Amino acid sequence: MNVYEKIGLQRVINCSGRMTYLGVSTFSDEVAKAAVEGGQSYVVIADLLERAGQIIAGYTGGEDACPTSCASAAIALSVAGIITGGKKSLVERMPDSTGLKNEIIVQRGHVIEFGAPMKTVIRTGGGILKEVGNVNITLPEDIEEAIDENTAALFFCKSHHCVQEGIVPIETMAEIAHRHNLPLLVDAAAEEDFRKYLKKGADLVCYSGAKALEATTSGFVTGRKDLIAAVRKQYGGIGRCMKVGKEQIMGLLKALECYENKDMDAYVRNQKETNAYLIEELNKLPGLKAREVQDEAGRAIYRCVVEVDEKITGMKALDIDMALLEGNPSVRTRNEFLNATVLTFDPRPMVKGDKELIVEKIKTILQK
Ligand SMILES: *Cc1c(COP(=O)(O)O)cnc(C)c1O
């Protein structure tokens, strides 16, 4: 029995991905140890925020950085930092930004929902999203012409949730922003490269700690020194409602250290080994056709996709998904989220023993 079963909850097998609704990721013993040690000692929090920020900056190529409770908090605090410039009276007024430059320009294909609407997150920081262009096509002049005396920043979201074609690229967004003396804020919450977007010209970039890094629940923003200082000031304002704990921060720092030395070959190899097992076992079952596919956004993620021949199985992929979800353990595939017509398994979040349980459960479902 795991700790969640002990309090009366289902055991969950996550083969969906780094999903917030399933607890995002699991952390390593090393990260756990750092979090425990951090949690069992005292520290001057203001010093920890600054020092941790410097360390995060070292791993990400920022001039400075600031730890946060999650990526959404990083975005909200960044917006508030940009709007207030860190001025105390303004910090204490947030999220009321009446009369200040508070509009955040975004291309329409980037106004996403990731469990909460992006609009809400921006508004929490006192920002008002100004959507420009069209969902499937936005041009540089759409951005350029939207800039006026109320503009606080340009915003770019790098995510598989976003429209990928017909968008204004990040380099162009940076060029336009800087020509107008505005910062470019980037949401790269789930991305795996912590340096890339600063190199492309972003002024502030927000990341999740629990997604690619598999850290404790946390996040951070990295980038320009003056803006980071203004972000940090928000802990005396709206940031108090998004307090980041010392244990979260110490887990995050350890995860960044481990990530530097991450064996990418082993990471891919583990995925492929799990997929190979699933493909071999599932292809033995009549009506199922399993194969491996790479992530649609081109990341080093390989998933197992299973086509279901309804004529043979008597069940649609979605029916099998629903049956997988029911009972204990509850197997959560990607389809629950995507509502696709095939079964999709992400091997990354799976822990030891999961793949065998998945195959067993599918066999039982198909026998019914
Ligand atoms: C997950 C995600 C977020 C939110 O990150 P949290 O750390 O859960 O707050 C924001 N933007 C994108 C693109 C995401 O994928």
Image (tube, rainbow, N blue to C red):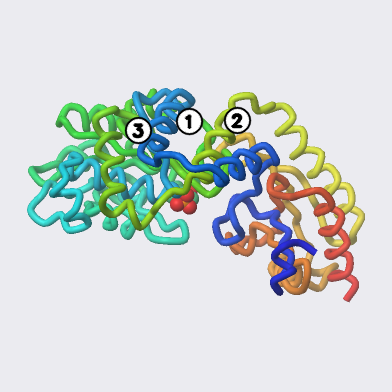
Number of other residues with Cα within 10 Å of mark 3, as a class: few under 14, some 14 to 19, many 20 or more: some
Look at label 1 and name its amino acid: Phe
Q: Secondary structure at mark 2?
A: helix
Q: What amino acid type should be assigned to the residue bearing mark 3?
A: Ile
Residue mark closest to the camera, 2 vs 3:
2
Q: Earlier in the sequence, mark 1 or mark 3?
A: 3
Mark 1 — residue? 194
Labelled pair 2, 1 in contact (Cβ < 8 Å)? yes
> Mark 2, residues whose alpha carbon is within 10 Å: few (<14), some, or many (≥20)?
some
Instruction: Using residue 194 as the reference point, say whether residue 90 is left or right of it.
Output: left
The residue positioned 85% from the left and 67% from the top of the image is: 312
Quadrant location of the N terminus in the rendered image: bottom right
Ligand 1 neighbours mark 2 (CB distance < 8 Å): no
**Residue topped by disc 2:** 259
Quadrant for residue 60, please give it: top left
1 vs 3, front mark = 1
Is 193 or 238 nearer to us in this picture?
A: 238
Percent position (x, y) of residue 231?
A: 29, 40
**Mark 1 CB lies closer than 8 A to ligand 1:** no
Q: How much space separates mark 2 and mark 3, taking CA atoms?
A: 25 Å
- Residue 316 vs residue 97, the one in the foreground: 97
Identity, as a three-letter code, of the amino acid under mark 2: Tyr
Marked residue nearer the N-terminal end (2 or 3): 3
The quadrant the C terminus occupies is bottom right
Q: Which residue is mark 3?
A: 170
Percent x, y of residue 337: 58, 61
